[in-house]
Image: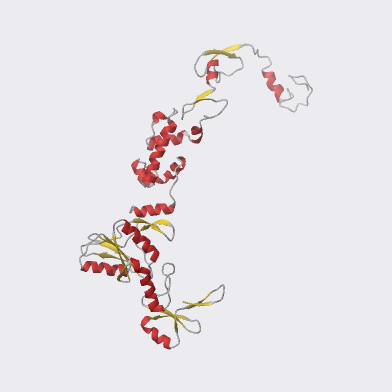
């Protein structure tokens, strides 16, 4: 068989067997068309009458003026003219980092001036909005929810994380956020069940306060008997912790307005000497008077270590540095052990009886790694 277009012999497998290949089939359809003959059409952009080739489509034809203008585009963000055939986007560095959707979000919620969009002043306006949000967040210590209320942002405040990442503003760590919430009174210690007595207490003048230990309850009753006005956990004070080398938030136990006195209630079991000194230093620096009640007795902060040492020397004949190690001694009982290495607790008033029976003060334990017995 011969191809109808090129005249070559072929096996007739392509199509109906008239042409030898696809190229011959297509070229034969336009072979007799006069390519020099033109037809009338309209420019799809401006509607101008133009003449195009006979086999050209009317749906895509453009005049010469529109073909030249089509090469250049105006950036919707900064208004810069760029050649679309050389680059698919604006070459401005600001436009490459930001898109129109993000700018529209700033316009909708944060007061971005819409007239600046499409001009070279768009970057200046962007930096203005960024400085406002930075000042609210870092200088004025506002949270994401506070900023959302200021700008009437009704969506999820958690989206501010995306905004701040887009604006390249650093965000607070979780610990910094928690400390700030305590300092601003937005967060407080919740009621919880533990080994210490915790309960609500009604003061002599009818106020409801929450006390977290029997020591606090005892001191509150004394103030009620004397009809002294007091507040419980009223302040959130930022102080420097020399042990952790970091700022922390202190919540004083009691505050007496009549004498401008902050009162901390502690027991020897829960007291951290160095931490209490750091707190007291900040209280006095802020102009408050300070009082420490330790085991129902008022203790001078300057002689605190001596009082702690004397207390433990008197009972166990062993000095324990309370600022770093919690004591193994509770108020009503102590540890004893026998020759077989058995530990036991006994009341203080029964200590002499057990010693006569061969028991010794302190407790004995074995180090798993070194297999050495230690007595405390």
- Between residue 322 and residue 61, name the one nearer to us: 322
Q: Is residue 346 above or below residue 47?
A: below
Q: What scheme was used to colour the molecule?
A: secondary structure
x and y percentages locating residue 190 in the rendered image: 35, 60
* Residue at 38% in and 78% down: 314
Where residue 285 sits, quadrant-wise, is: bottom left
- Between residue 21 and residue 304, name the one nearer to us: 304
* Picture quarter with the N terminus: top right
Instruction: Name the residue at the top extreme.
Output: 37
Residue 207 placement, left or right of 56:
left
Inspect this view and state whether residue 125 appears: yes
Q: Is residue 341 above or below residue 75?
A: below
Where residue 221 sits, quadrant-wise, is: bottom left
x and y percentages locating residue 165 in the rendered image: 46, 43
x and y percentages locating residue 120 in the rendered image: 45, 28
Residue 35 placement, left or right of 331:
right
Q: Is residue 253 above or below residue 312?
A: above
Q: How many marks?
A: 0
x and y percentages locating residue 141 in the rendered image: 37, 47
Inspect this view and state whether residue 190 appears: no
């Amino acid at each position: 068989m011969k191809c109808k277009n090129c005249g070559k012999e072929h096996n007739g497998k392509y199509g109906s067997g008239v042409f030898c290949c696809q190229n011959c089939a297509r070229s034969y359809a336009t072979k007799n068309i006069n390519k020099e003959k033109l037809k009338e059409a309209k420019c799809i952009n401006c509607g101008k009458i133009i003449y195009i080739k006979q086999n050209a489509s009317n749906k895509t034809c453009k005049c010469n003026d529109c073909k030249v203008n089509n090469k250049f585009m105006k950036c919707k963000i900064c208004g810069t003219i760029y050649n679309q055939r050389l680059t698919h986007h604006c070459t401005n560095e600001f436009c490459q980092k930001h898109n129109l959707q993000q700018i529209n979000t700033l316009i909708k919620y944060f007061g971005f001036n819409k007239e600046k969009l499409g001009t070279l002043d768009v970057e200046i306006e962007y930096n203005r909005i960024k400085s406002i949000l930075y000042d609210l967040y870092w200088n004025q210590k506002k949270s994401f929810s506070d900023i959302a209320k200021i700008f009437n942002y009704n969506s999820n405040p958690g989206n501010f994380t995306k905004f701040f990442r887009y604006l390249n503003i650093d965000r607070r760590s979780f610990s910094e956020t928690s400390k700030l919430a305590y300092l601003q009174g937005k967060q407080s210690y919740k009621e919880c069940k533990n080994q210490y007595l915790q309960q609500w207490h009604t003061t002599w003048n009818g106020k409801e306060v929450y006390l977290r230990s029997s020591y606090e309850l005892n001191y509150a009753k004394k103030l009620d008997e004397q009809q002294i006005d007091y507040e419980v956990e009223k302040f959130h004070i930022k102080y420097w912790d020399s042990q952790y080398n970091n700022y922390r938030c202190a919540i004083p136990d009691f505050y007496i307005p009549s004498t401008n006195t902050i009162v901390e209630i502690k027991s020897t079991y829960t007291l951290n000497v160095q931490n209490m000194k750091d707190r007291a230093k900040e209280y006095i620096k802020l102009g408050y008077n300070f009082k420490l009640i330790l085991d129902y007795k008022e203790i001078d902060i300057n002689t605190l270590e001596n009082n702690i040492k004397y207390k433990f020397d008197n009972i166990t004949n062993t000095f324990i540095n309370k600022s770093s190690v919690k004591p193994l001694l509770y108020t009503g009982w102590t540890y004893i052990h026998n020759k077989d290495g058995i530990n036991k607790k006994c009341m203080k008033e029964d200590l002499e009886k057990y010693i006569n029976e061969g028991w010794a003060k302190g407790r004995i334990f074995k180090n798993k790694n070194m297999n050495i017995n230690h007595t405390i």
